[in-house]
Amino acid sequence: MQKLKLVMVGNGMAGVRTLEELLKLTPDLYDITVFGAEPHPNYNRILLSPVLAGEQTFEEIVLNDLDWYAQNGIELKLGRKVVDIDRRNRVVIADDGSRAEYDRLLLATGSNPFILPVPGHKLDGVIGYRDIADTRMMMETAKVHRHAVVIGGGLLGLEAANGLKQRGMDVTVVHLGGWLLERQLDETAGRLLQTALEGRGIAFRLGGVTEELMDNGDGRVCAVRLKDGEVLAADLVVMAAGIRPNTELAEKAGIPCNRGILVSDTLQTFDPRVYAVGECANHRGTAYGLVAPLFEQAKVCANHLAQFGIGIYKGSVTSTKLKVTGIDLFSAGDFLGGEGTETITLSDPIGGVYKKLVIKNEVLVGACLYGDTADGGWYFRQVREGANISEIRDHLMFGENAIGDVGHQGQNSTANMPDDMEVCGCNGVCKGTIVKAIQENGLFSVDDIKKHTKAASSCGSCTGLVEQILISTVGGAADVKPKSEKAICGCSDLNHGQVRKAIRDNHLTSISEAMQAMQWRTPNGCATCRPALNYYLISTWPGEAKDDPQSRFINERAHANIQKDGTYSVVPRILGGVTNAAELRRIADVADKYQVPMVKITGGQRIDLLGIRKEDLPKVWKDLDMPSGHAYGKSIRTVKTCVGQEFCRFGTQNSTQMGIDLERALSFMWSPHKVKLAVSGCPRNCAESGIKDVGIIGVDSGWELYIGGNGGIKTEAGEFFVKVKTAEEVMEYSLAFIELYRQEAFYLERTVHYMHRVGLEHIKKAVLHDEARRKELHRNLVFALSLQSDPWKQQIEQPALNRQYQRIDVRPLESV
Amino acid sequence: MNWLDICALDEINPLGSRVVAAPGGDIAIFRTASDEVFALDDRCPHKGGPLSQGLVFGNTVACPLHNWQIDLASGAALAPDVGCAHRHLTRIEGGRVQLALNSKEECSPS
Ligand SMILES: Cc1cc2nc3c(=O)[nH]c(=O)nc-3n(C[C@H](O)[C@H](O)[C@H](O)COP(=O)(O)OP(=O)(O)OC[C@H]3O[C@@H](n4cnc5c(N)ncnc54)[C@H](O)[C@@H]3O)c2cc1C
Ligand code: HEM
Ligand code: SF4
Ligand code: FES
């Protein structure tokens, strides 16, 4: 098949990211030609500031070296500016006369610095701050000249001022506004920042209006004259007063522009063959000036270019961060607030900490942090998700880690961490390693970091820390999406919610069918998506979808828990923790017969036989003659119980029997993640019902139900859900909630995270306020469970399943 | 070359594996979706995890212990991990899987 021709104009961050996304989707659809006006391959523009400040070198900030273009068969025309587009003949023409035909054209021309049209703006020594050439020129000037004036006290201007100061110049920032960064900070934070920068020797003229740039007589600038008459010496003037989308080429070609090239939700211009992404594009009235939204555009544009057509770009919420080493500020969303909003502020001017959160209708809509930005990423996520915060309002100001977090020596902020401090306890990855990987490989997301360093790839408890390191290294360019928006894995662009919906809407019942319908990019998925798909299929279509053991992790395939030496552990079901002499005797006999290295009482009130060889598993199960306790799966685990009314002098309810009944009812249930219950007989709560997915506490007049508790990496107390009178009601409400969770949660999402995502109100509406819905949910789960039976029995009895436990002995063939 | 008879192809599930008890230690035999069969020492180059117990996709197996991804054809760990599992030769003759032990030092697991 003849390949289509794709031409890209502008070899910058948004454009090249689009090509990367496109190549991931369809490596062979297009012959690609790229024109770049700069003589460099794609580099990380946002790191020009650390380069200027002497913290990094030009070589370090290259994102795609020339090899990358070659390996992907991209024809790269560097140092060539496209000057014309002949849309009738579908050809672009560059300034050296070279031409390229296109079937699809991608404009990614970025933007230009806005140069104030004051007298003298064309003098030597007056520049914008945009590219490597500008940065070089600033570095050279700093070697031989003394006085610099930066016009504009925004992010770019301050980063320029800081860099020039680091290189030894005397720097004055002339800023029109009443305080610095008025687009990112409120006045209080702006003043704190100014004080900190003045402490570093940078001078400011706030409210300063530039009237003229003065000539030294040789065509070079020598001073800046302000409106109030003050004259500032200046051998270098950096204009950082804003950027203008670079639409020159598009306008010339007759493509409609209005402060940016106008694009649709699929990033197409009015000419559907011509796409535009990046700072040059105006989407729904906004031209973005930060990397993160541009990367979202890139993804959608690539999807459309690949002819998939399932992506839609709806605009982005942005966040910003100033990249001046040693100064921490962060802002996101609507941080100024206004009518209909409430603000919570924390202000410690002496300690140099200021935090402001803006809330509207119980949703966090903006945040502005100065001095302590450790929770920036977390707040940003709350803003983007639009989650209801009424339940966490009390500790919102203290951030994500206001509740205990174990396994990182109590660290919850990376700001003061030394480079050699361990961040990921599972894989032994230190902060310095992560920072280095981010800088050297140009990483923008936690997923990228996982792939390059392994940090956060195991238990995931350090994800928040890794995210912070990412944000403090690349600032607003960090791609910190919530799981609800992230693609399920590299095999698809759909997120978990979209996959669940497609499976339900299209009645998909097998993995191959699902992958086909959703256009999976890989023939049989990967270790991330297959277990998720399998769960979604069997939970959505019980009895119809066929469980695929090959898509389950080993524990759920072998129905035992793999240990680090490759042996397994066996935990038989002991309902409610109540056993008897006959069972204990059989367990003891098995321990003797198979020389079990360790017999342990688990925290779930049952007995664990550890160190069993795989080939012995079926025999052990047979000898035990007890059903599986499912201690190994994303499934029901145990129902922990206390002694209760029958024996305990405080007991108000028969907690043990309630626990036994619940555990029997839920036996063999699969779920998005593990599900643990507990029943206590009175509020002394000996069974620890407060940290269970469903916790039940007997009181004199009935039972209280708590949901969404968790004793894991982060201890989460359950939320009070409802009080009921009878044991039958406990059963109905608990099962209805669990079924809702089974239907709606994402794979590997614990009840607490599910609850935070959808909101407690949503769960109450379905289970408490709507009796018909509750009964239906309860019925659905009872039906699904009626199809399940003891997996150990199946493994023993069915040869196709039993095979995996048998090792094969080798038989020589005659030599051939 | 000494070929050993292992089992019928049907006795390995597609995207599944079996363990062969060989004199020099266990060998994992994998079957892919396209019915190709590969054999590796059943020891992950990371910390010796039993690769036979991993999840198979494409021509890759994910180790059950810490999720290293191992290329079935070469035995090499995929980036960012470095290391490799010793590989053996396989073929399918008349619906039966055959294995030839490979004693060459092709890689040094780290
Ligand atoms: C110093 C500095 C610091 C920054 N810091 C941050 C930050 O911390 N966080 C953040 O999110 N963003 C930051 N930004 C902004 C970020 O770099 C931009 O948003 C991003 O680079 C825009 O990408 P783009 O692809 O749209 O444009 P660019 O990366 O500018 O790419 C456009 C390219 O097209 C070329 N071009 C233009 N016209 C033509 C033509 N006719 N023919 C051929 N080539 C052409 C240009 O030469 C340029 O190379 C910073 C920017 C600067 C300058
Ligand atoms: C996310 C972190 C956790 C992981 C990865 C984890 C992992 C495991 C594993 C692998 C087992 C099985 C042991 C075996 O039989 O071989 C187990 C069992 C158990 N875990 Fe955890 N666990 C975690 C957190 C917790 C927490 C926070 C609690 C309690 C508050 C807990 C309570 C239990 C109990 C009670 C058992 C016994 C199993 C049973 O009887 O069902 N676990 N866990
Ligand atoms: S929770 Fe109450 S009823 Fe149960 S054992 Fe403790 S004190 Fe007794
Ligand atoms: S032993 Fe295989 S990944 Fe660790």
Image: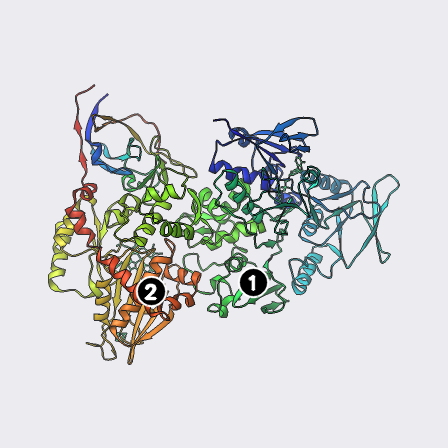
Contact, mark 1 vs mark 2 (Cβ under 8 Å): no
- Percent coordinates x, y for residue A300 in the rendering: 52, 44
Is residue A603 in view? Answer: no
Residue A550's image quarter? top left
Vertical relation: A597 (above or below) A756: above
Q: Secondary structure at mark 1?
A: strand
- Percent coordinates x, y for residue A570 in the rendering: 21, 53
Q: Is residue A412 left or right of residue A88?
A: left
Density class for disc 1 (Cα within 10 Å; few <14, some 14-19, many ≥20) is: many
**Kind of residue indicated by mark 1:** Val
Between residue A167 and residue A156, name the one nearer to us.
Answer: A156
Q: Nearer the viewer, mark 1 or mark 2?
A: 2
Is residue A95 in view? Answer: yes
Callout 1: residue from which chain? A
**Kind of residue indicated by mark 2:** Phe
What residue lies at 56% left-to-right and 67% top-to-bottom? A360
On the rendered image, what quadrant is the C terminus of chain A found in? top left
Hey, which residue is sitting farthest right in the picture? A217
- Disc on res. A462: none
- Mark found first going from the N terminus, 1 or 2: 1
Between residue A95 and residue A199, name the one nearer to us.
Answer: A95
List the residue tagged with mark 2: A737
List the residue tagged with mark 1: A365
